[in-house]
Amino acid sequence: MSRTQTLEAPADHPVSRARQWLEPAVERAGELLLGKDDAVRLALACCLARGHLLIEDLPGVGKTLLAHVLARVLGLGFRRVQFTSDLLPSDILGVSVYDRRAGGFAFHPGPIFSQVLLADEVNRATPKTQSALLEAMEEAQVSVEGETRPLPTPFFVVATQNPSCQVGTFPLPESQLDRFLMRLHLGYPDPVAERALLVGRDRRDLLEELQPCATPEQLLAAHRAVEAVHVSAPLLDYVQELLGFTRRDPGFRHGLSPRAGLSLLRGARAWALLEGREFVLPDDVRRVLPAVAGHRLVPVEEGDTAAAALLARLLNEVAVP
């Protein structure tokens, strides 16, 4: 028996049952998002960890397509909101409208009442509208006109963001960025993937043909399976060492918070489930760390190069158990 086989969970374990549909989901999503298997797996891990995803990149690299594909392969309801500077909180949350026949006000739910919400170009809306979305993400409920309404389960927000150097953007403050479990950059495709994209069928046609690999009930069961993935004491020591490094190193303006540490563990548990294991390895933590910590760590020196160098130091200088 190989080492990989010995590390996998038994066939009747919840982790194994979830993996039966997760692997086909990754494969089907990869057929549309060519050359982006790592991004697909991280996005799925974010959803499995019951977090929300921020995708920051230039227009036209597949941010919106990734959100569509995730909703399709998971069998979830999907709504999209194009964020603009004149978008109001009520356009997202909903509003009460007077019904003459009923003689009272009736609540008309907004697009946030969906299982997957794509907040497209979230940093083009004003801070007030951004806050309405992010509060709902944190509380999994909406309070409108004095009444609290729960959001659907599962509930997953995928927000896309254009680089802050582009015209007409309102950068998300650090406290709101922290509400996203992960941030991804898709980047340009490699030459092989781009050639297949150029000569292949239209992605919109392929999206219409995409069949789900799971049901909402299976996803909820996978959420519970993630929570049951074991984290050992040495692994916890490793996570605390990573957190401590960011707080001691003068290259960071401030270190990772306890909430960031919890997010790192949730992401690592979800990645372990994707790998078919019922326990977390240090490699799982290292794999999700850039996506979990990259938008939470602010380097003293500005620039993407400085941020990437600090993340590399974090991974290289903290001893792996």
Image (spheres, rainbow, N blue to C red):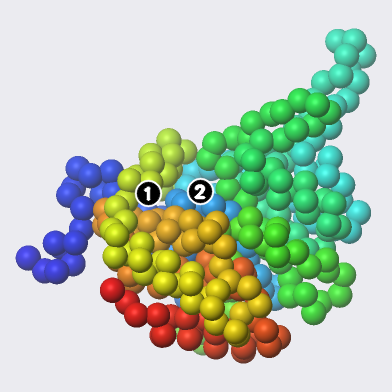
Residue at label 1? 226
Residue at label 2? 50
Question: Residue 234 falls in which quadrant of the image?
Answer: bottom left
Marks 1 and 2 in Cβ contact (< 8 Å): yes
Q: Position of residue 134 (x, y in %)?
A: 71, 50
SS for dot 1:
helix
Question: Residue 319 falls in which quadrant of the image?
Answer: bottom left
* The residue positioned farthest toward the left in the image shown: 1
What residue lies at 62% left-to-right and 70% top-to-bottom?
295
What residue lies at 29% left-to-right and 60% top-to-bottom?
233
Q: Residues within 10 Å of mark 2 (few under 14, many from 20)?
A: many
Closer-to-camera residue (45/278): 278
What residue lies at 74% left-to-right and 75% top-to-bottom?
163
Query: In the rendered image of this protein, does residue 77 appear above or below residue 252?
Result: above
246 relative position to 100: left or right: left
What residue lies at 31% left-to-right and 56% top-to-bottom?
231
SS for dot 2:
loop
